[in-house]
Image (spheres, rainbow, N blue to C red):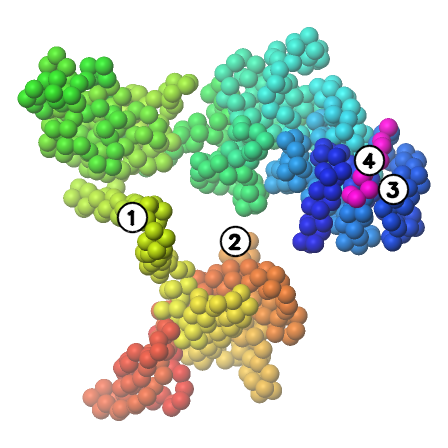
């Protein structure tokens, strides 16, 4: 990873280029890469530059080193294009010194550092120009990892830009196959400067054979086993300029459709492709859109549709995009895998977390696992719906199928559904119709909000028109526009009022569902997914579509369900009230007044916000329950973790917490082994021998925990939860796996191999803390045990046993809670007693 010094050096070098009149990002990257290649190919010549003055630097590079570079690269047998033909050296004198200093921060021979430098230059280019010519790094990772090219594959990008996808494919093969691949790489690019960058990019990434051509991407030759590309969105071609082969497959002038078909034609039989497309390709209704989708589904094997978050290509492109994966194989059966990374509605770019989630679920797709974001759809189902590839359509269909299996009821079967009827142009104020009663009052859709207005405040229907249909108490009303629906149950005073156009009204016909429950469901994302979009420009929910919504049942009486829904709403309203109060306090800070008054208001707002945050944090602190209810050694370490003032202190507390957790689990395991007669277990015997030698390690403790856990499961003995807690989970994960990793990290750190710099400590903490958290969660049965320190033992003849008075050593308390209990045998003084291991 590039150091901060290198990143700062890049900025200084870029500024020096600008000062010297070189402002094109492509040119800057190009010139820096020339020098990088000179250093790589001519080490003695590079050594001449150290200590030379500005004028000497320019002379040495332009007259000797750069000409050598040109001849060297053109003679390279693996380079099938004269990458540097007509190249010119144009680094200003002051910038040249900056670049030399920059490159000297990367050790000679550090190929990874050189590649990272080039990639960082591409990432930073948009800061210095409006052009964005690279694919975002997470998108590149996603495409390459899903295609998983092998050393035998030939890889093509018909619109390669600076070659990022081709370089990433080469890196993937080298990383996974452990070799320097001599693969066939092909890239086409219409822009000569970008093509030159692509060539240098591939040289830096050690690509042996690369054919880069400056040509129309629709006319790319050859057949390849892997095609990946991120073509520009939008644009049209003259129909006369479309190659005959493409025009015969689909008649269109849209560039994104033509490039998609062109990519499919580049594939060998059995070859795989990954193509970024605008989302309009998935659902466009033109004959060309439908035909292209049919080709992918019927004449190829469409493997995956991944919807990218809306902000993935911002600020350079505002269109929403998707990734299509397909194989050149005739397969009309099977399933298409959908993943929707845009389902949360946010406009964030594709993140590394998104990528990790996509890849994890992609690997599991064969098992048919269905999540909120991903699912499989049979090809025949896609064909039945006009080859529509929008995940929303199939999510809605599958949601309905699931609800049908759960015996949910259709809304139209339990309620009358009708639209509002009074046009906005018919409305006036109360002054227009004196003494207007409720029968002339109209609930207009715009009046629906968090609180209904009083009936007396509603507008009136002019000319005294009274409808034969009127609203009733208990009716559920909402708007027909998405995001503004505001489903509301009408109170008694609204009986007799009229409904405005744009309103939808539901009148439940029986007591199957409480009105409040139905209104809450209609406001949920699950119900919203069932609503079919009506209309292309302004999607409206029709009464028929609303009647088709399936409402899931909920066990319980109407009064109980209604009460629970109202409590949910009360909590949400209180959160909104707190938010409004905090916003108001922020606004008051800068109202007119003296600086002293402003300071006072600032302090008041800060105090209010702090108190609110502290109270919320107490409820949400993930370690709070561990601190309050786990054995004292663990609870004390958790307290230190929560309240440590520095990262280093928190790091030490996390280690101590891991140690306390392992010791506590070990004590439970040994107690169980002694009680059950399992002292002869190999792991317990090894622990005992280590005690005799005076050298018990955390590895011995972990061995006892693992061994007793296995014995407990084989004996069908729960041991207060130890058996289940230590069981191996899917993927060889679980508590034992986490503890084993913690022991390895702990031993390395305690034996002198730990982090030293603040950055290293922070990275180490980021590794340890999730393991500790999972370990604590997986050991939750400890909070249900009794850890007692006995103080007094009294014989009780009536029971023939002993009554013990002691302190409960649970939780992080300054004074432990007194506890009393009966025991069948005397307990030793100054020993910890562990109860409820049964």
Badge 1 or badge 2: first in the primary sequence: 1
Tell me whether the residue at label 1 lies in contact with that at label 2, contact meaning CB atoms closer than 8 angstroms: no
As measured in the structure, the alpha-carbon distance from the residue carrying label 1 to the one carrying label 3 is 64 Å
Q: What SS does tag 4 mark? A: loop
Q: CA distance from mark 2 to mark 4?
A: 58 Å
Q: CA distance from mark 4 to mark 3?
A: 10 Å
Toward the front, the furthest residue is: 594
Name the residue at the left extreme. Answer: 435
Mark nearer the N terminus (2 vs 4): 4
In the foreground, 4 or 379: 4
Circle 2 is placed at which residue position? 730
Evaluate if marks 1 and 3 touch, with contact meaning CB atoms under 8 Å apart: no
Label 1 vs label 2: CA separation? 47 Å
In the rendered structure, find residue 90 and report the number of the disc placed on it.
4
Q: Which residue is mark 3?
A: 58
Secondary structure, magenta segment, majority class: loop
Q: Quadrant of the C terminus?
A: bottom left
Query: Relative to 796, is 773 on the left or the right?
Result: right
Mark 3 and mark 2 residues within 8 Å of each other at the beta carbon: no
Please state which of the two labelled residues, at mark 4 or mark 1, is closer to the viewer. 4
User: Which circle marks residue 581 in the picture?
Assistant: 1
Q: Position of residue 761 (x, y in %)?
A: 59, 64
Magenta range is: 86-95
How packed is label 2: few (under 14 Cα within 10 Å), some, or many (20 or more)? few
Can you say whether 816 is above or below 129 in the image?
Answer: below
SS at mark 1 in the image: helix
Is residue 760 visible to the viewer in this orientation of the structure?
A: yes
Mark 2: secondary structure: helix
* Residue 83, quarter of the rendered image: top right
Packing grade of label 3 (10 A; few <14, some 14-19, many >=20) is: many
């Amino acid at each position: 990873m590039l150091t901060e010094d290198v990143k700062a050096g890049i900025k200084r070098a870029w500024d020096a280029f600008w000062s010297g009149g070189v402002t094109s990002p492509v040119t800057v990257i190009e010139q820096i890469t020339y020098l990088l290649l000179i250093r790589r190919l001519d080490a003695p010549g590079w050594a001449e530059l150290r200590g030379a003055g500005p004028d000497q630097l320019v002379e040495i590079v332009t007259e000797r080193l750069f000409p050598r570079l040109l001849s060297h690269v053109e003679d390279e047998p693996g380079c099938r294009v004269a990458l540097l033909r007509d190249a010119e050296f144009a680094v200003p004198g002051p910038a040249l010194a900056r670049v030399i200093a920059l490159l000297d921060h990367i050790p000679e021979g550090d190929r990874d550092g050189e590649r990272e430098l080039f990639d960082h230059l591409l990432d930073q280019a948009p800061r210095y120009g409006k052009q964005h010519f690279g694919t975002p790094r997470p998108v590149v990772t996603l495409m390459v990892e899903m295609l998983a090219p092998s050393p035998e594959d030939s890889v093509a990008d018909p619109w390669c830009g600076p070659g990022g996808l081709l370089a990433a494919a080469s890196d993937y093969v080298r990383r996974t196959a452990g070799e320097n691949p001599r693969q066939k790489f092909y890239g086409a690019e219409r822009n000569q400067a970008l093509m030159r960058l692509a060539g240098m990019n591939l040289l830096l990434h050690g690509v042996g054979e690369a054919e880069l051509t400056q040509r129309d991407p629709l006319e790319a030759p050859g057949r390849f086993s892997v095609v990946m590309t991120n073509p520009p969105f939008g644009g049209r071609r003259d129909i006369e300029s479309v190659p005959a082969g493409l025009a015969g497959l689909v008649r269109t002038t849209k560039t994104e459709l033509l490039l998609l078909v062109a990519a499919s034609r580049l594939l060998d039989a059995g070859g795989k492709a990954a193509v970024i497309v605008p989302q309009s390709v998935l659902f466009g209704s033109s004959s060309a859109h439908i035909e292209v989708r049919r080709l992918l589904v019927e004449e190829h094997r469409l493997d995956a549709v991944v919807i990218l978050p809306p902000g993935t290509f911002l600020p350079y492109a505002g269109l929403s995009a998707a990734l299509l994966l397909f194989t050149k194989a005739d397969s009309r059966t099977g399933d298409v895998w959908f993943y929707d990374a845009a389902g949360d509605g946010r406009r964030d770019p594709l993140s590394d977390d998104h990528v990790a989630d996509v890849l994890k679920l992609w690997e599991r797709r064969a098992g048919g696992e269905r999540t909120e974001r991903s699912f499989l759809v049979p090809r025949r189902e896609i064909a039945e719906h006009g080859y529509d590839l929008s995940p929303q359509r199939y999510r809605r269909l599958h949601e309905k199928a699931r609800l049908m299996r759960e015996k949910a009821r259709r809304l139209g079967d339990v309620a009358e559904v009708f639209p509002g009827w009074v046009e906005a142009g018919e409305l006036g104020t109360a002054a227009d119709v004196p003494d207007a009663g409720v029968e002339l009052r109209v609930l207009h859709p715009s009046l629906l909000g968090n609180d209904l207005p009083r009936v007396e405040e509603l507008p009136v229907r002019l000319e005294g028109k009274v409808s034969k249909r009127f609203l009733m108490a208990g009716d559920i009303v909402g708007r027909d526009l998405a995001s503004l629906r505001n489903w509301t149950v009408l109170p008694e005073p609204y009986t007799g009022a009229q409904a405005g156009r744009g309103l939808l009204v539901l009148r439940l016909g029986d007591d199957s569902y409480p009105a409040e429950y139905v209104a809450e469901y209609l406001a949920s994302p699950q119900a919203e997914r069932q609503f079919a979009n009506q209309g292309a420009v302004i999607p409206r929910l029709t009464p028929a579509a609303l009647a088709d919504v399936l409402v899931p049942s909920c066990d319980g009486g109407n009064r109980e369900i209604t009460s629970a829904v109202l409590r949910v709403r009360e909590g949400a309203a209180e959160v909104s009230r707190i938010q409004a109060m905090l916003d108001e306090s922020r606004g008051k800070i800068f109202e007119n007044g003296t600086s002293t008054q402003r300071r006072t208001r600032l302090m008041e707002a800060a105090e209010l916000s702090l108190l609110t945050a502290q109270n919320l944090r107490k409820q949400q602190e993930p370690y709070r329950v561990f601190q309050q209810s786990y054995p004292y050694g663990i609870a004390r370490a958790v307290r230190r973790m929560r309240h440590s003032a520095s990262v280093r202190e928190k790091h030490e507390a996390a280690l101590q917490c891991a140690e306390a957790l392992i010791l506590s689990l070990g004590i439970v395991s040994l107690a169980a082994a002694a009680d059950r007669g399992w002292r002869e277990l190999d792991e317990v015997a090894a622990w005992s021998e280590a005690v005799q030698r005076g050298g018990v390690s955390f590895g011995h403790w972990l061995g006892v925990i693992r061994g007793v856990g296995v014995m407990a499961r084989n004996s069908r003995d729960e041991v207060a939860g130890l058996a289940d807690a230590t069981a191996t989970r899917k993927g060889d994960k679980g508590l034992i796996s986490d503890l084993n990793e913690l022991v390895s990290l702990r031993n390395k750190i305690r034996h002198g191999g730990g982090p030293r710099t603040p950055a290293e400590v922070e990275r180490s903490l980021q590794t340890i803390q999730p393991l500790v958290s999972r370990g604590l969660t997986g050991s939750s049965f400890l909070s249900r045990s009794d850890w007692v320190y006995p103080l007094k033992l009294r014989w009780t003849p009536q029971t023939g046993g002993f009554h013990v008075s002691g302190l409960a050593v649970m939780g992080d308390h300054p004074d432990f809670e007194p506890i009393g209990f009966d025991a069948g045998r005397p307990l030793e003084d100054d020993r910890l007693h562990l109860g409820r291991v049964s």
